[in-house]
Amino acid sequence: MKIALFADYHGGDRVWPLLEEALEDQRLDLIVFAGDILDSAEREAEWQKVRSTGKAPRKPKAESEQDGVIDELVYREFFINLTGFGVPIVFVPGHLDAPTARLNETVKGFTNAHNVQEKSFEMAGYTFIGWGGAVGPVDTDYEFYCSKERAFKKRLSSGFDRDPARTILLVHTPPISMVDLDPAVNDHVGAKVINEVIEKHQPAFCFCGHAHGTPGQDSIGPTVVVNPGPMFRGRYALINTEQHRVLFPTPLKV
């Protein structure tokens, strides 16, 4: 199975014509996206505040109807472009894709897009499971999307009911590894709980995003961990699951 892996779109609509040309002859079977369709400075600032202080976010302020409409338009444009490649799409929400109910409602119109946080997806003998958002000190799905470590681990581990060697784990936040550095905050942003899940269940692959500074691959035991880098900067990865081969094409000049 040949997969194109993306993460962290952040409203980067300039990538589409370049991506269409780059993937024209790839004969893909599947597109996988590891979260963060939206780009929200306010949500990101609130997440960083909670991450640094460990305190719950401020009480949500009333959201204008216009904000919701804009989010839905971005979601719709994103999936219109992805479905244009003519293959199924597997994804999880990012921490900026909040509230996730809005994303899920928009995706209902795209029958070939599958949120594996909601339901696992099977293709070519592989089972895709996942959980999106950030891993942190609170459970929230308004200003941004985040799960506490214990809740994250419980939700994610419940999906490993098939052969681990034929299971692919899709998360937004990376495990602690060589692919979890984010220069925007000059810090590693991986979550130990994801390492624990990987070490226990040993899936074939773990696909992730969130950390913009260290696209590439790493290994945790037999599991191949892949962070394609931010889509809005023209980065992506191509994976051949049967050969366990990962390629990182030259970034598109967006």
Image (cartoon, rainbow, N blue to C red):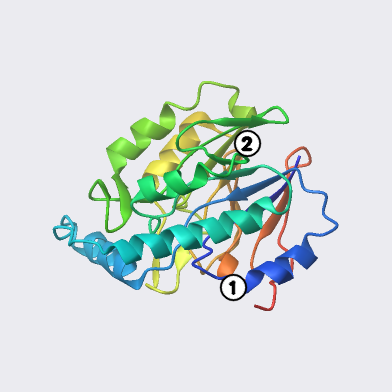
User: Residue 2: image x %, image y %?
Assistant: 76, 45
Amino acid residing under circle 2:
Ala
User: Element at badge 1?
Assistant: helix
Residue at x-position 31% and y-position 50%: 146
User: Residue 211: image x %, image y %?
Assistant: 47, 63
Tell me how far mark 1 sits from mark 2, CA to CA.
27 Å
Residue 64 got which mark? none
**If the image is split into quadrants, where does the C terminus sit?**
bottom right
Q: Nearer the viewer, residue 203 or 5?
A: 5
**Is 41 drawn above or below residue 132 in the view shown?**
below
**Is 186 drawn above or below residue 188 in the view shown?**
below
Residue 180 visible to the viewer: no
Mark 1 = which residue? 233
User: Residue 127: image x %, image y %?
Assistant: 61, 30
Q: Nearer the viewer, residue 113 or 164?
A: 113
Q: For the residue carrying disc 2, how many other residues have a C-alpha within 10 Å: few (<14), some (14-19), or many (20+)?
A: many
Q: Quadrant of residue 223?
A: top right
**If the image is split into quadrants, where does the N terminus sit?**
top right
User: Residue 161: image x %, image y %?
Assistant: 51, 21
Residue 237 visible to the viewer: yes
User: Element at badge 2?
Assistant: loop
Q: Nearer the viewer, residue 216 or 138?
A: 138
Residue 12 placement, left or right of 148: right
- Between disc 1 and disc 2, the foreground one is 1
Residue 123 placement, left or right of 35: right
Residue 58 placement, left or right of 219: left
Q: For the residue carrying disc 1, how many other residues have a C-alpha within 10 Å: few (<14), some (14-19), or many (20+)?
A: some
Mark 2 = which residue? 204
Amino acid residing under circle 1:
Arg
**Is 224 drawn above or below residue 40 in the view shown?**
above
Q: Earlier in the sequence, mark 1 or mark 2?
A: 2
Residue at x-position 58% and y-position 70%: 13
